[in-house]
Image (spheres, rainbow, N blue to C red):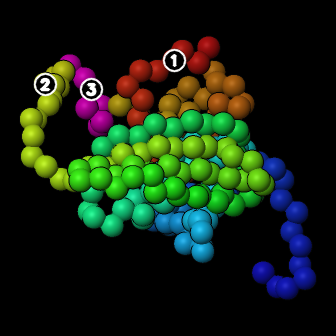
């Protein structure tokens, strides 16, 4: 676009300009910029005008993992969503190294926008060890992905019965295809 030229974009179109449409877009979004004392992340929409919580959680986990130097793997995490995130403001992720023990490392990540804490995460990382295998046999009656409708297909099939807001949300291209197992009645 030539310098000095301004284009006015309506709010629904602005959402699409800030969206991520491919897996590459998603992977780029998850890689944070390392600053002196924090990580910096940007936000993309998945159809709403606020930051998607899963994105903040994933970016926080990325920041925590980048402070682990002994090849430990995620063992558990706890997180709290405290405030709504703004798509237009970068998020600063501060990592506190709480503990590095013989088997576990613990990290706390605080996500901040405009001097407000919007999210906190506590994560525990464990050294790789062999142990008991826990699993449950999969229910064979569950439909396979190829037998399910994607959100785009659902919109196409039931769009006449959906609210404008739901249709708008389902219209956003995403890097991952969603195929709900159970569908709510749109009427």
Q: Which residue is drawn at 68% across and 52% down?
A: 112
Q: Residue at x 61, y 29 (%)?
A: 159
Task: Provide the residue designation for mark 2.
Answer: 137
Task: Provide the residue designation for mark 3.
Answer: 143
Any mark on residue 184, and which? 1
Any mark on residue 22, and which? none
Q: Judging from the image, what secondary structure is the residue with disc 2 in?
A: loop
Q: How crowded is mark 2: few (under 14 residues within 10 Å), some or many (20 or more)?
A: few
Q: Residues within 10 Å of mark 3 (few under 14, many from 20)?
A: few
Q: Is residue 159 above or below residue 94?
A: above
For marks 2 and 1, the one nearer the N-term is 2
State left or right for residue 45 relative to residue 95.
Answer: right
The magenta span reads 141-147
Q: How many marks?
A: 3
What is the CA distance from the residue labelled 2 to the residue labelled 1? Answer: 27 Å
147 or 74, nearer to the observer: 74
Whether label 1 touches label 3, CB < 8 Å: no
Q: Disc 2 vs disc 1: which is toward the camera?
A: 2
Tell me the quarter of the image containing the C terminus: top right
Q: Position of residue 96 (x, y in %)?
A: 51, 56
13 or 115, nearer to the observer: 115
Q: Judging from the image, what secondary structure is the residue with disc 3 in?
A: loop
160 or 62, nearer to the observer: 62
Q: Where is residue 173 in the image (x, y as percent from the top left)?
A: 55, 50
For marks 1 and 3, the one nearer the N-term is 3
What is the CA distance from the residue labelled 2 to the residue labelled 3? Answer: 15 Å
């Amino acid at each position: 676009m030539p310098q000095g030229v301004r284009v006015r974009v309506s709010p629904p179109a602005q959402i699409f300009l800030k969206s991520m449409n491919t897996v590459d877009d998603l992977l780029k979004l998850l890689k944070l910029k390392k600053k002196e004392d924090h990580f910096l992340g940007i936000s993309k929409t998945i159809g709403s005008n606020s930051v998607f919580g899963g994105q903040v959680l994933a970016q926080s986990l990325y920041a925590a993992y980048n402070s682990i130097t002994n090849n430990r793997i995620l063992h558990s995490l706890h997180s709290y969503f405290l405030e709504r995130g703004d798509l237009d403001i970068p998020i600063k992720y501060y990592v506190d190294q709480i503990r590095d023990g013989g088997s576990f490392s613990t990290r706390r990540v605080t996500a901040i926008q405009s001097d407000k804490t919007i999210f906190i995460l506590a994560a525990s990382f464990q050294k790789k060890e062999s142990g008991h295998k826990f699993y449950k046999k999969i229910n064979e009656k569950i439909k396979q992905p190829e037998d399910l409708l994607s959100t785009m297909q659902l919109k196409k099939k039931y769009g006449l019965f959906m609210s404008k807001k739901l249709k708008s949300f389902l219209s956003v291209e995403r890097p991952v295809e969603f195929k709900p197992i159970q569908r709510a009645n749109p009427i």
